[in-house]
Amino acid sequence: MAGLVAAARARELGAKPVVLEKGDRAGGSMLLSSGVVWRHRTLDDFRAECPGGDPSLQARIVEELDDALDWLERLGVEPVRRETGNPLTVGRRYDPRVLADVLVRAAGEVRLGEPFSDAQILATGGFGVRLARERGLLVRAAPWSEGDGLAFALARGAATTAGMGEYYARAVPGPVGEEDFVRASQLYARHALVVDDDGRDLGGAAWHESDIVQRFPDGRAWYVVDMRALQQRVRERTVADLVEAARAAGGDVRPAEQLPFELPASAKLAEPPFLAVRVYAGVTHTIGGIRVDERSRVVDADGTPVADLYAAGADAGGIFTGGYGSGLAAALVFGRIAAQSALGR
Ligand SMILES: Cc1cc2nc3c(=O)[nH]c(=O)nc-3n(C[C@H](O)[C@H](O)[C@H](O)COP(=O)(O)OP(=O)(O)OC[C@H]3O[C@@H](n4cnc5c(N)ncnc54)[C@H](O)[C@@H]3O)c2cc1C
């Protein structure tokens, strides 16, 4: 997304950008996403949720996202909803296909199937695919984000941020297809007893659940729910719907007595029978990455800008360190900033 946004903004400012896209379609992970572009309500909230992130980068998202969302509307993207459905956040929800179509048109020249060899603005979506492969985890994202932007920046003297091992994670019931990335995600750890393969309780989850999924040993766990939990709502669905989606996607859903270990006692398991769902960590994108300043300039270890090099989106790390935030918001806000900085605005 960040590359398309940067090109659209650069064109608006009179430049003639070219977007080089390694994949066979434009839009990256944005095209596969739920399309909710959001921010924490205040910088203090953002700091509390992502304490390891760079406050100056976080401030730009809080200060500029609303204007950037208005800009999207001026480009011709109508939101499908003007709220996120989450009282902790504010933002808008888009149809990702509409978002991609409008941005591709606004970006101008987009060449598919062309990995970059030189670039002014890096926006390759981080290195989630490589991180997943190295750790034996599943990928829940577009398949092209191998860290090419990071490698290019490092060769030019860039520094990296804190949290290079962190990623935005969702529990998935197995290696599901792209059409099931959203539908089959298992987002009810807060209602489940979460245990490892020896039956050890893995503890509680934050509201976004990205934390507990990163704690799955070897990227695997079980979510065990009782009858009460099945009726709980998760956004527009119930936990029972999500369990059914896991089953429909080919996941392992079984009565808890068929687990090969004893379950610990838990207040989460009050109303039998209990159901167990096999879940795996799905890497959506990395959280650490290239160090940038608040103008999206790639910087070295001293904070000195690397000449004429900018990064945006998941390539620019250190925004959500220690927590979770909207990758689409980062791509939108810093894609615009990168274009402005590259053009001296
Ligand atoms: C299922 C799912 C649901 C999500 N839901 C949400 C949500 O509701 N809200 C939210 O905020 N975030 C969501 N996200 C995350 C969001 O999609 C990402 O944070 C966002 O797309 C990151 O933007 P980006 O520009 O950094 O990367 P991308 O959008 O992935 O774009 C990076 C592009 O770079 C290309 N590329 C990679 N390497 C090269 C190379 N060497 N040369 C040229 N091109 C290259 C890739 O092919 C890709 O097209 C979701 C993600 C997924 C997968």
Image: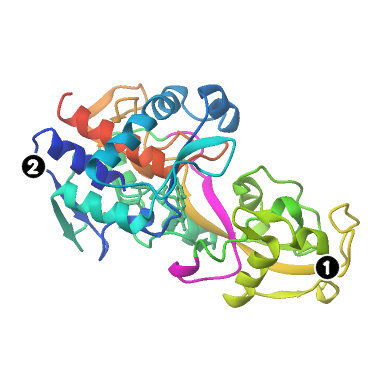
Residue with the mark numbered 2 = 16
Q: Is residue 251 left or right of residue 268?
A: left
Verify whether residue 173 appears in magenta: yes
Between 23 and 290, the residue placed more toward the observer is: 23
Between 343 and 90, the residue placed more toward the observer is: 90
Q: Is residue 127 left or right of residue 170?
A: left
Dot 1 amino acid type: Phe
Residue at image position (18%, 31%) is: 342
State the image quarter where residue 265 is shown. bottom right
Residue at image position (18%, 23%) is: 345
Lower sequence index among marks 1 and 2? 2
Disc 1 versus disc 2: distance between alpha carbons?
Answer: 59 Å
Whether residue 308 can be seen here: no
Percent x, y of residue 154: 31, 40
Specify start and end residues of the magenta stretch as a single range. 161-180
Determine whether 64 is above or below 241 in the image: above
Percent x, y of residue 173: 61, 68
Residue at image position (65%, 67%) is: 241
Dot 2 amino acid type: Lys
State the image quarter where residue 195 is shown. bottom right
Counting labels gives: 2
SS for dot 1? loop
Percent x, y of residue 236: 59, 56
Residue with the mark numbered 1 = 274
